[in-house]
Image (cartoon, rainbow, N blue to C red):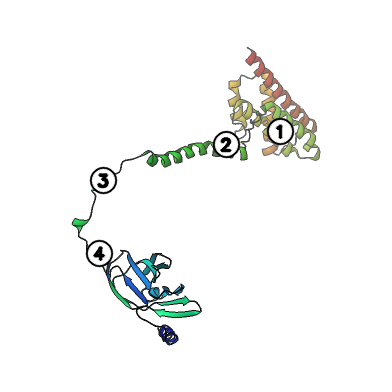
């Protein structure tokens, strides 16, 4: 405010010999305007200067913060008697306002004059309009159009097309490994022959390990009966095993071989007997003979 007052005093001092309140005038179409409506500010400079070099419209915005310029014209010389300029504006706040003098600079030849306009009071009020004067339309429900369905249809179509693409991409990135078929089970007699060969190569009886040799020989025979004939031989006693195998209808040779092998094993394990050296290998071969005869009997039964 002090800066603006100082400016006004300086301009007034510089233009004492040129200042004339009738030269530069401002007026509005209506000094009582309504909020939000447009008004026209008309500026006139009466003395026929060669040009109007400057007009300080920004001063108005400083005095009236809610002042907004909508449109303005260039300065025009009217009837060779006065310069005219129009500014269309609006004010977005109610109240009583005074537009302070506006500064303009005019030139004629080498002469430059500083001009001040007259102050201009005016007011802004709310629009005085009743509901009866307004053209209020009835509320109506807008009907659906193709545009209302277009976006949902495009979304659904995009999802439908995207699902196969995702499935293809997933399969391409992570190919499904083929499931390997489980190897066929090893026949009971094949496993038994392999175990007997390994036991023979160990030759445990040669180092006095009779008990360990007979225990393994007995267990190989018991597992053969379990794998080949579903007899719970590993956890059964010798008497129980001989009872189970009766349903197999063994011949005398098969029964004798199995009974001798199991009973000798029990003697070595529980009575700590030491069988003759040659009987260890003989019983091992006897186990092979027992298994071979059992397999031969099974094949002949299947062929019948």
Image location (x, y in percent) of residue 265: 69, 34
- Give the Cα distance between marks 1 and 2: 59 Å
Q: Quadrant of the C terminus?
A: top right
Mark 2 crowdedness (10 Å alpha carbons): few <14, some 14-19, many ≥20: few
Residue at label 3?
140
Please identify the quarter of the rendering in which residue 4 is found.
bottom left
Q: Which residue lies furthest to the top in this view?
A: 304
Residue at label 4?
127
Q: Are marks 4 and 1 in contact (CB under 8 Å)?
A: no
Q: Along the polypeptide, which appears first: circle 2 or circle 3?
A: 3
Does residue 249 sit above or below 147 in this rendering? above
Please identify the quarter of the rendering in which residue 236 is found.
top right
Q: Which of 245 and 109 is in front in this view?
A: 109
Image location (x, y in percent) of residue 92: 33, 67
- Give the Cα distance between marks 2 and 3: 49 Å
Q: Are marks 1 and 2 in contact (CB under 8 Å)?
A: no
Q: Are marks 2 and 3 in contact (CB under 8 Å)?
A: no
Q: Relative to 204, is 111 on the left or the right?
A: left
User: Which numbered mark, 3 or 1, is in the foreground of this view?
Assistant: 3
Mark 1 crowdedness (10 Å alpha carbons): few <14, some 14-19, many ≥20: many
Residue at label 1?
217
């Amino acid at each position: 405010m002090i800066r603006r007052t100082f400016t006004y005093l300086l301009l007034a001092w510089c233009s004492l010999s040129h200042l004339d309140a009738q030269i530069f005038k401002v007026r509005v179409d209506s000094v009582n305007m309504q909020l939000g409506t447009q008004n026209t500010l008309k500026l006139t400079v009466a003395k026929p200067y060669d040009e109007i070099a400057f007009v300080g419209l920004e001063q108005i915005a400083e005095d009236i913060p809610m002042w907004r310029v909508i449109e303005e014209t260039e300065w025009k010389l009217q009837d060779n008697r006065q310069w005219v300029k129009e500014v269309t504006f609006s004010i977005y706040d109610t109240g009583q306002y005074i537009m302070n003098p506006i500064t303009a600079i005019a030139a004629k030849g080498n002469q430059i004059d500083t001009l001040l306009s007259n102050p201009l009071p005016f007011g802004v009020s709310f629009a005085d309009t009743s509901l009866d004067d307004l053209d209020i339309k009835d509320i109506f429900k807008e009907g659906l159009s193709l545009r209302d369905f277009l976006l949902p249809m495009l979304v659904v179509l995009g999802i439908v097309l995207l699902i196969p693409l995702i499935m293809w991409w997933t399969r391409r990135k992570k190919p499904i490994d083929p499931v390997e078929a489980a190897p066929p089970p090893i026949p009971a007699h094949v496993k038994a022959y392999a175990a007997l060969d390994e036991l023979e190569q160990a030759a445990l009886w040669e180092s006095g390990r009779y008990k360990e040799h007979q225990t393994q020989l007995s267990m190989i025979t018991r597992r053969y009966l379990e794998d080949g004939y579903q007899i719970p031989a590993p956890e059964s006693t010798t008497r129980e095993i001989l009872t189970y195998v009766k349903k197999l209808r063994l011949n005398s040779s098969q029964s004798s071989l199995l009974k001798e092998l199991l009973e000798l094993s029990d003697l070595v394990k529980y009575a700590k007997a030491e069988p003759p050296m040659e009987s260890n290998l003989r019983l091992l071969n006897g186990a092979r003979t027992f298994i071979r005869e059992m397999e031969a009997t099974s094949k002949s039964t299947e062929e019948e």
